[in-house]
Amino acid sequence: MGANTSQVSDLSESQSIRTLIGPDAISENEPFWNQLISFTFTSPTSMFGVFDHLSVSLIVQNNPRSGNFGALVRVFLSRTKELKISTECQDQLFIWQAHNALFLVRCLLKVFIRQMNEEELHLQFSYQERAPGTYDSICEDLLEELVCNLVHLIVEVPLLDITYNILFEAVTTLLVLLSYQLFHKEVLREGLIYSYLTRGRCLSLTSRLVKTLLYNFIRQEKCPAATHVLQTQSDGGGLLYGLASGVASGLWSVFTLGGVGSRPGAEHDQNPLPLSNQSLLLLLVLANLTDGPDCPNPYRQAVTCFKNTQDSSSIPSPQPHTFQINFNSLYTALCEQQKSDQVTLLLYTLLHQNSNMRTYILSRTDMENLVLPILEILYHVEERNSHHVYMALIILLILTEDDTFNRSIHEVMLKNISWYTERVLTEISLGSLLILVVIRTIQFNMTRTRDKYLHTNCLAALANMSAQFRNLHQYAAQRIISLFALLSKKHNKVLEQATQSLRGPLGADDTTVLPDYAQDLNVIEEVIRMMLEIINSCLSNSLHHNPNLLYALLYKRELFEQFRSHPSFQDIMQNLDTVRRDSVFLLSSKHSSVYI
C-alpha cells in the first residue's frame, strides 16, 4: 500500500494492514512504516472501513505478542518532534504522514477500548507479552508518552490549512481515550488516562490546553477545501465525523444523561466545523471530569477562573491554571452557535462557574444577541431534548437573578420575530418576548411532559423578573392571565376528581388504590400561589408602568374570586384586592367614563 491507495477497500484489504495486525513483530526503523502511512483516500463512514470484523479479532489476538501497535505509536511519536518545524517549512507530506499514523492509532485505540479495560490496553503499548497486572518498571510508559504528545501537539502546532487534519486527529484521539468512562465508571477517578491528564506531565499544560480548545471553538474554522480527508460522501458520512462521531456522541450522552441530542446532523448540514465542534466536546469532557481524592480537577479550575485579555488588573489570581482570553470573541461565538446543546452547556458552565465571564456577559448592551437564541430553543421545545431545554432555562434563571438585566431587557425593542409564529409581533420588548416564551414553555409542560421541576424553574425566572416588569406588551399581559385561567381550570378539575374519589364508587372495597389527588392539588396550588405572587409583585412595584396587565387583570377579575376564601391564598389575595382598589381609583380619576 502506497501513496496511490485511494479506496477504502484498498486500505482494508492492503497487505500492509494485514502485516500490521499479524503476529510478526516489525521494528519501527523498517521502511514498512513509510509505506503504511503514505496513503490518501476518501472518507470511510466507520472504523470498519479500515479494519473489518476479522481484522478487529486479529488485532486483539496478535498485538500483545507482536507489539506492532506499540511500534506504530513510536513511529507517530518520532514524527511529532518535527511537526512544528515541518509546519514552518510547509512540509505537507511530512505532516500528512504523521496524520495518517495518528489516524491508524486512533482506529486501533477505538477497537481496544471497546474490547478491554485500561490495564489490558496498557499491555498493547509494550513489545512483549506480560501477565495481566504486571509491568516492567524500566520500560517507558508509552501510553503516557502518547497522551502527553497529543496535548503538546494541540497547544504547540498552529492551526493552518495544512495542520487542520492532524489537529483534529489529536483532539479526537484524546476524546477516544477519555471514552473509557462510557464502559468503566471506575476510571473517572482512578484510571491511568485520568491520572496522566490531571496529575502527570500534562498538568503544567492545563491552562494552555483549555485556552487552545476555546480558541478553536471561537475561530469556527471550516474544513480546508483542498483536503481529501474532510470530503463528504454522498451519504453524508465523513472520515473525521464518521470515525469520531460514535465516541463524541457517546461522551455527549454522558452530559445529557443519556438523552437524545438535537436533530441528528443539524450542526453539520452546512459548513461543517469539525475541529471547532470536537475541541468544544473535549473541553467539556475535561472540565466535567470528577475531582480526584487528593486534588481538584485542574481543567475545571482553568475554565472557572480565566480572565479577559482587556483586564489590566495587576492583582494575581489565587486560582491555579488561570489565563486570559478575548471575552468579546468568546461572547460572539456563544451567541452565534447556540443551536447546539454542547454550546449551550458551555454557556451555562461559564455563567454558573466563571464569575469574570458572568460579569462581562451581564454588562453587555447587546444582550438580545445572546437571549434570542436561548428563547428560540425554548420556543421549539418539542424539537429539543429535555436536557437542552433545561440548560436554556437555567441560563435564563441565572440571568434573571440580576436586577440590571431585568430592567434592561424591557428597554430593548425587537421587530418581526420570524420564529415566533403564534402571533405576528411587529414590535415587542425583549422582556415581553421572554415572558411569552416562558409561559408557552409552562403550558407545553402542563399538557405534555408534566415535569414539576421544569415549570417551577420557569416560574422562578418570571418571579425574578416580576418586580422589574415594564410596559408589558398587551399580548404578554393577556398570556399571564390566560396561564392563571388554565391553572384555575386544572385546579377545579382535580378538586372535583378528588371529591368524587372520596365518595367512592358503589361496590368498591377498601383495598381499591385511588390516585393521589391530594399531591396533585398541592402541586397545582403551589404553582397558583407563585403566579399570584408574580402578579402581585409586578403591580406592587410597577403599577404605573403596566397598564396592559392591569386592564387584563380587571377584565378577568372573576377568575380570582374562588381563591379569595381559600386558606392558602388569603394573604396574597388581600394584597391583590388592595392593589386593585387603588388601580380602580387611579383609572377612575383619569378616565371618569371607565366602569369597573
Image (tube, helix red, strand yellow):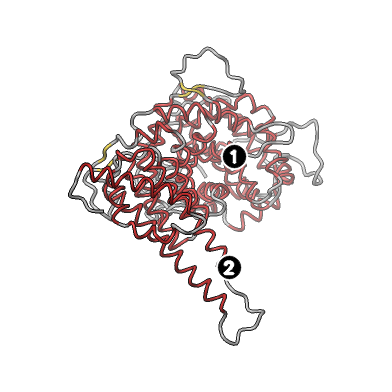
The quarter of the displayed image where residue 134 is located: top right
| Left or right side of 289 for 487 | left
> How many residues crowd around disc 1 within 10 Å: few (fewer than 14), some, or many (20 or more)?
some
Which amino acid type is marked by label 2? Asp
Q: Nearer the viewer, residue 98 or 244?
A: 244
Which residue extends farthest top? 314
Residue 581 position within the rendered picture, expressed as x and y whole percent measured from the top left = 33, 47
Query: What secondary structure is found at the residue carrying circle 2?
Result: loop
The quarter of the displayed image where residue 335 is located: top left
Q: Residue at x 42, y 61 (%)?
A: 562
Sequence order check, earlier mark of 1 and 2: 1
Residue 424 position within the rendered picture, expressed as x and y whole percent measured from the top left = 23, 51
Which residue extends farthest bottom? 507
| Left or right side of 85 for 75 | right
Residue denoted by label 2:
516
Whether residue 268 is visible here, answered yes or no, is: no
Which amino acid type is marked by label 1? Asn
- Label placed on residue 288: 1
Whether residue 116 is visible here, answered yes or no, is: yes
Q: Height in image: 275 above or below 234?
A: above
